[in-house]
Structure formats: structure tokens, C-alpha cells
Amino acid sequence: MQGKLELMMGPMRSNKTAELLRRADMRRQYAKQFVLVLKPSDDTKGGPGVVESRNPNGGGKMSALEFNSTNPWEVLRLIRDKEQEIGKRVECLAIDEGQFVSDLFAFTRHLLDAGHDVLVAGLDLDFRAMPFGEMLNLTWLVNAYGGSITECMAYCNCGARALYSQRFIDGKPAPYDSPIKVPGDSYEPRCSDHFVLPGKPR
Ligand SMILES: [Zn+2]
């Protein structure tokens, strides 16, 4: 039987990770499932081997299996090893920061075809307000395999719903052509009136 996909998307500070961990915990506690939490190597917000919500009041943290975000396929071996170790199936995989994972669409489809339920949390848009990685492609899989899409809500300082992740470098709005990785960058959720992107071509 195929698995189902639960997708949690939204901008920065929309409690995506807290929601992912809450669902993983529910499955463990009440459904007695084995849930393997996966953390791509580009996710730096928790310590090594830990998935952690940025919200100090939400969700806490959970130990996680780290994998190279450029090669999620290496996880298949780790799942087999884990299933041998625990003597039963890994019913559910929970992937945080899905936007960083290469081949996310094909990898998730493979897991669903192999009968695992999959939870994926991640950013829908990058700081340029463009689709981030393959997160938005996963909506097709929800349609085809069943499951749910949760738009995690974030709020701008003005109180309106924030759809965008405003990036700052040295306290200033990051220009459109700034590099993908900058040490010391930071983010705030912003509504369309307060989202600014200096140098945006159109
Ligand atoms: Zn605003």
C-alpha cells in the first residue's frame, strides 16, 4: 500500500517545524508508529542530529537523522538499517527544511511508493519570493497519493498575514542578487505591503 503525504509550508516563523514535530509526536504516542525524523545537512538551526523549532514556546526539539541534502537517496540504506535494528517497519518519515533537499519530488514519491507515510515541512518561497527548491512540486503528490497541505500562517509586524520571508544582511533588506548563503543573515515574515526586495528586475 502507498503512503500518504502531509505537507506543511509557509514563510519563516510560521511554526512549520513545531507542527512537524507535533505530528511526529502524535504518531509515536497514539498510533505507536516508528517515526524517523530526517534533517538535511543544510539545516543549521538545531545542533547536529537535532531538529529544533525556532519558536522557544513551540514544539521543542527531537533527535533526527542527518543526511546530505544533495543526496537524499543515502537515507534509503539508513531506513533499512533502522528497520533491521527495531525489527519492524519505519511507518513514517518526517523531513524538515524540505526546500534544501535535492531530488525532493522523486525521493518523496519513492518513499510513498514504498509504503511510508511522509511528513514534509519547509519554506514555499525563497527570499526573492520565488519557489524554493521542490516544495511546491510536492502538492502534486498530495493530490495523487492523498494526504494534506497545511499553509502555516505567519504574521507581519503590522498584523497582516505574512506571505514572504524578508531577508536582512547587516540589518538591511537583502538585495535581489545577494548570494544564497551569507553568514549572519536573518529573516522576518512580511506582508506584501512591507516586503521589500531592492534591485528586483520586475
Ligand atoms: Zn505588513
Image (cartoon, rainbow, N blue to C red):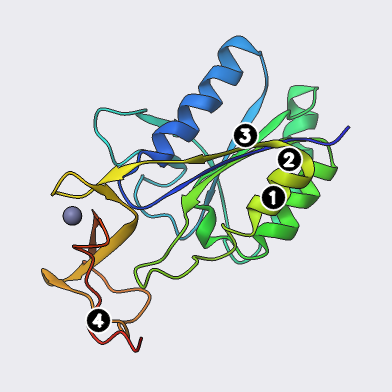
Looking at the rendered structure, the kind of residue marked 3 is Leu
Residue 36 numbered mark, or none: 3
* Residue at mark 2 to residue at mark 1: CA–CA distance: 6 Å
User: What residue is pinned by disc 2?
Assistant: 79
Quarter of the picture holding the N terminus:
top right
Tell me the quarter of the image containing the C terminus.
Answer: bottom left
Q: Residue at x 25, y 56 (%)?
A: 191
The kind of residue on which mark 1 rests is: Val
Q: Marks 1 and 4: CB-CB under 8 Å? A: no
Q: In terms of secondary structure, where does tag 2 sit?
A: helix
**Are there few (<14), some (14-19), or many (20+) residues within 10 Å of tag 2?**
some
Disc 3 element:
strand
Image height of 42 relative to 2, above or below: below
> Mark 4: is the Cβ under 8 angstroms from ligand 1?
no
Q: Which residue is mark 4?
A: 175
Label 1 – label 4 distance at C-alpha: 36 Å
